[in-house]
Amino acid sequence: MNNKQIILVLLFSSFSIAGFSQFTFSVSPGLGLNTAHVGYKVNPKIVPFFGFQYATGSLTQVDSYEEYDRDRGTIVQVEDEVKANGGIFLPNLGVKYFLLQKEKVSTYALTSFSVPIITGKVTDSDGDVIRLSDEIEKFGVWGAELGFGAEYFFDKSFSLGGEFGVRYIRAKAEQSFNDSVFNPNTGNNIPSESTTSFAAALNPTYSKISLNFYF
């Protein structure tokens, strides 16, 4: 069983556990993507959760230059405009595990897994449209987080938390296409297949402050 399956099992099985249990809601405002988490506190130690982040944006690029127009027989000013707009939705599944508790302060470790969902399009001056979702499907993009934090409980239903951790983001793609190789010994082109592979990884750290509600 892989890590993603383990997190899913923990999340859904938690709803069938009787005894100590609480729904939780956390928000983390910040300069980047704002974050919200909905979880279920199975016991005083374990909180499986579902989180989401969402952002939208747009970009316009205009290239202005001069070129010779054969139909007009003169040099003219030309503008090429490219517009892009879209959004990114980052759902993630994770588990928070409380480590130590001293008076009103509790420390915890956290891990989560996410797969970004990207929508949008790019339109050029000729009206050609590229769907971002079609391009992203060519890549296996996923991310994970591992963090450590602490919460100060003002009462049993509300706490203020601080967290620091590391994110791992990976993208991988492979594309194959038909090609040919010229054989000088025979003077013929021999059919062949070429493959282009792409892989990238990023490990940024992060820090955030969270407001946590327990029901």
Image (cartoon, rainbow, N blue to C red):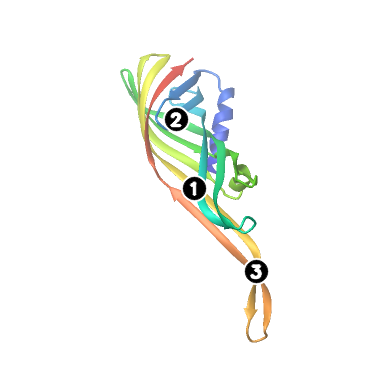
Name which of mark 1 and mark 2 comes first in the sequence.
2
What's the amino acid at mark 3?
A: Asp
Residue marked by disc 3 = 179
The front one of 102 and 169 is 169
- Above or below for 102 versus 85: above
Camera-nearest label, 1 or 3:
3
Left or right: residue 167 versus residue 129 is: left
**Location of residue 127 in the rendering, given as x and y in whole percent from the top left corner:** 65, 44
The numbered mark, 3 or 2, whose residue comes first in the sequence reads 2
Question: What is the quadrant of the N terminus in the image?
Answer: top right
Q: Amino acid at mark 2?
A: Lys
Choose between 123 and 103: the one closer to the eye. 123
Q: Is residue 75 rendered to the left or right of residue 180?
A: left
Instruction: From the image, state whether disc 3 or disc 2 is nearer to you.
Output: 3
Label 3 element class:
strand
* Residue plotted at (55% across, 49% down): 78
Tell which of 22 and 209 is nearer to you. 209
Q: Position of residue 164 (x, y in %)?
A: 35, 34
Secondary structure, mark 2, is: strand
Mark 1 or 2: the one toward you: 1
Q: Amino acid at mark 1?
A: Arg
The residue that disc 1 covers is 170
Furthest toward the front, the residue is: 73
Q: Position of residue 93 (x, y in %)?
A: 52, 33
> Would you call the spot at circle 1 few (<14 residues within 10 Å), some (14-19), or many (20 or more)?
some
Q: Position of residue 58 (x, y in %)?
A: 52, 36
Q: Which mark is residue 96?
A: 2
Image height of 57 relative to 131, above or below:
above
